[in-house]
Image (tube, rainbow, N blue to C red):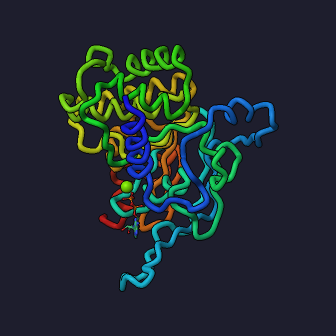
């Protein structure tokens, strides 16, 4: 791939993942050099992988004639190592905004957010995460393995390690058979799984997936669920948003339900079901005021 294409792709990757970039950062690409240094530099260690305290995000109308919009209001939650955490809420609840704060794409208006004990405003906080955006756009004239090589270069993964990682992630997302086919020939489910493979290429400890199953058929959804389960078995922490409650019920250790930017319910599904004497769907509908 020519340097020119690589540079263009890099900027497309950055822009497709960025809504309101922080002005003080050049790039969100982790620097593997500092990753390896982190451990021996006394990188702050914390029990929680994600720690959010009293987070508030207000999008300013700023002379557009639009009013200010409070997307997240007083959100506090924590996600522990190895947990699969379902971040639920109807459209507009503030799920993507919260994830964008964790990823450093949107600034908190107030409150605190930490990844592995480090404030998300520090780029180093994002060293150990993989991210699947709500809307993905991949270069359709690349094959899966070419796309993954491209991302491996962004992460500066050495070549022999790259090929090993590509084999590993393609196996995990069940795309080995299609690794040399152009992505444009993939089904929606396969495209989503390429997205998951991309998020995993740097072997992150925390995965942030924004509605990973949206728009997929039941088989596609089941496959994504299985991938999340495999990641959990590998000891990864998974924080994903969804409004599809069936899948959440089968795969999550804990859930939080967000509505109009506020945390309404949080806990283990079995405990919530016991407390409310309702199933998860009924709890969800009650929380958002439909029943
Ligand atoms: N860039 C933005 N500018 C202004 N308002 C926004 C922006 N992004 C999201 N919002 C608003 O913030 C609220 C939360 O949106 P979002 O975080 O995308 O919710 P969800 O992901 O749960 O659907 C919504 O009211 C949405 O319209
Ligand atoms: Mg969203």
Q: Residue at x 46, y 72 (%)?
A: 59
Q: Position of residue 126 (x, y in %)?
A: 60, 44
State whether residue 127 appears in this view: yes
Q: Quadrant of residue 33?
A: top right
Q: Position of residue 248 (x, y in %)?
A: 39, 40
State whether residue 270 appears in this view: no
Q: Residue at x 49, y 29 (%)?
A: 153
Instruction: State how many labels appear.
Output: 0
User: Quarter holding the N terminus?
Assistant: top left
**Quadrant containing ligand 1:** bottom left
The foreground one among 176 and 255 is 176
16 left or right, relative to 60: left
The foreground one among 257 and 160 is 160
User: Quarter holding the C terminus?
Assistant: bottom left
Q: Residue at x 40, y 82 (%)?
A: 67
Q: Quadrant of residue 45?
A: top right
Q: Is residue 93 above or below residue 276?
A: below
Q: Position of residue 92 (x, y in %)?
A: 36, 63
227 left or right, relative to 155: left
Q: Is residue 202 above or below residue 91?
A: above
Q: Residue at x 46, y 44 (%)?
A: 86
Q: Is residue 153 above or below residue 247?
A: above
């Amino acid at each position: 791939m020519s340097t020119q294409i690589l540079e263009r792709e890099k900027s497309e990757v950055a822009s497709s993942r960025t809504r309101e970039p922080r002005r003080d950062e050049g790039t969100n690409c982790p620097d593997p050099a500092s990753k390896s240094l982190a451990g021996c530099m006394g990188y702050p260690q914390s029990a929680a992988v994600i720690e959010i305290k009293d987070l508030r995000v207000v999008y300013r109308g700023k002379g557009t004639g639009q009013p200010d919009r409070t997307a997240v209001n007083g959100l506090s939650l924590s996600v522990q190592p190895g947990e699969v955490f379902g971040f639920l809420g109807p459209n507009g609840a503030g799920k993507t905004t919260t994830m964008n704060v964790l990823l450093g794409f949107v600034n908190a208006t107030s409150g605190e957010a930490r990844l592995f004990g480090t404030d998300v405003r520090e780029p180093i906080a994002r060293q150990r995460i993989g991210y699947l955006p709500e809307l993905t756009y991949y270069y359709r004239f690349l094959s899966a393995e070419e796309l993954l090589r491209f991302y491996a270069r962004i992460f500066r993964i050495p070549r022999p390690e790259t090929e090993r990682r590509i084999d590993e992630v393609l196996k995990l997302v069940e795309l080995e058979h299609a690794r040399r086919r152009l992505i444009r020939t993939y089904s929606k489910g396969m495209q989503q799984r390429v997205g998951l493979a991309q998020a995993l290429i740097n072997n992150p400890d925390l995965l942030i997936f924004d509605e990973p199953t949206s728009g997929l058929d039941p088989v596609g959804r089941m496959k994504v669920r299985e991938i999340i389960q495999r990641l959990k078995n590998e000891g990864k922490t998974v924080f994903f948003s969804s409004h599809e409650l069936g899948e959440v019920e089968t795969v999550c250790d804990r859930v939080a339900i967000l509505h109009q930017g506020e945390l309404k319910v949080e806990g283990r599904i079995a405990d919530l079901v016991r407390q409310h004497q309702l199933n998860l769907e009924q709890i969800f509908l009650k929380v958002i005021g439909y029943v």
